[in-house]
């Protein structure tokens, strides 16, 4: 299984975590709404920023994105909150725009969202 390249560092400045609870809710004519769980697992989303110290590191990540995971492939990375390994993929293959980072000249960042199953 492919791993997130070590040159792509996960930044803690843009972390957001969420999920679709996979619950069906039926409103009743009288009384409280009825709810039921649809799936035993849920798709978690994790917004994050990938930081690159050099343009060469950003180019290496882009080559990995196209050649190793084929834009939509699954890969492993460390969960930014828990530190455990999770298997993720970029939602719709979107890795975000490469933009200069505020930390200094030559630093770059991509804001993106990954999904994984819980």
Image (cartoon, rainbow, N blue to C red):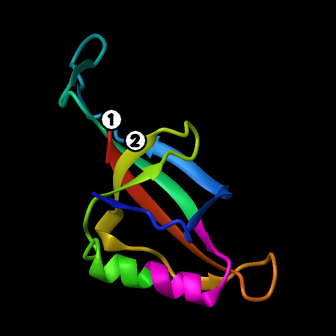
Secondary structure at numbered mark 2: strand
86 lies left or right of 34: right
Residue assigned mark 2 = 19
Residue 115, position in %: x, y? 36, 53
Provide the residue span drawn in magenta. Answer: 50-61
Tell me which label, 2 or 1, sits earlier in the chain: 2
Residue 62, position in %: x, y? 43, 83
Residue at 38%, 73% in the rendered image: 94
Viewer-side residue, 25 vs 110: 110
20 lies left or right of 5: left
Viewer-side residue, 15 vs 38: 15
Q: In which quarter of the image is the C terminus?
A: top left
Query: Pointers 2 and 1 in contact (CB under 8 A)?
Result: yes
Viewer-side residue, 8 vs 34: 8
* Disc 1 packing (10 Å; few <14; some 14–19; many ≥20): few
Residue at 21%, 19% in the rendered image: 29
Q: Does the magenta stretch include residue 56?
A: yes
Looking at this view, name the residue that lies furthest to the right.
104
Looking at this view, name the residue that lies furthest to the top.
31
Q: For residue 118, which numbered disc appears in the image?
A: 1
Residue at 30%, 69% in the rendered image: 92
Viewer-side residue, 38 vs 64: 64
Q: Is residue 30 magenta?
A: no
* Disc 2 packing (10 Å; few <14; some 14–19; many ≥20): some
Residue 44, position in %: x, y? 38, 43
Residue at 25%, 76% in the rendered image: 70
Q: Quadrant of the N terminus?
A: bottom left
Residue 86, picture quadrant: top left
Which marked residue is nearer to the observer: mark 2 or mark 1? 1
């Amino acid at each position: 299984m492919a791993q997130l390249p070590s040159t792509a560092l996960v930044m803690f400045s843009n972390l957001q975590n969420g999920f679709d609870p996979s619950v069906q809710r039926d409103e009743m004519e009288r009384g409280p709404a009825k709810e039921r769980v649809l799936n035993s697992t849920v798709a978690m989303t994790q917004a994050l920023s990938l930081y690159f110290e050099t343009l060469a590191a950003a180019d290496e990540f882009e080559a990995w994105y196209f050649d190793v995971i084929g834009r939509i492939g699954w890969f492993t990375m460390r969960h930014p909150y828990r530190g455990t390994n999770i298997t993720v993929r970029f939602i719709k293959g979107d890795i975000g725009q490469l933009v200069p980072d505020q930390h200094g000249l030559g630093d770059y960042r991509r804001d993106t969202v990954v999904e994984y199953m819980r």
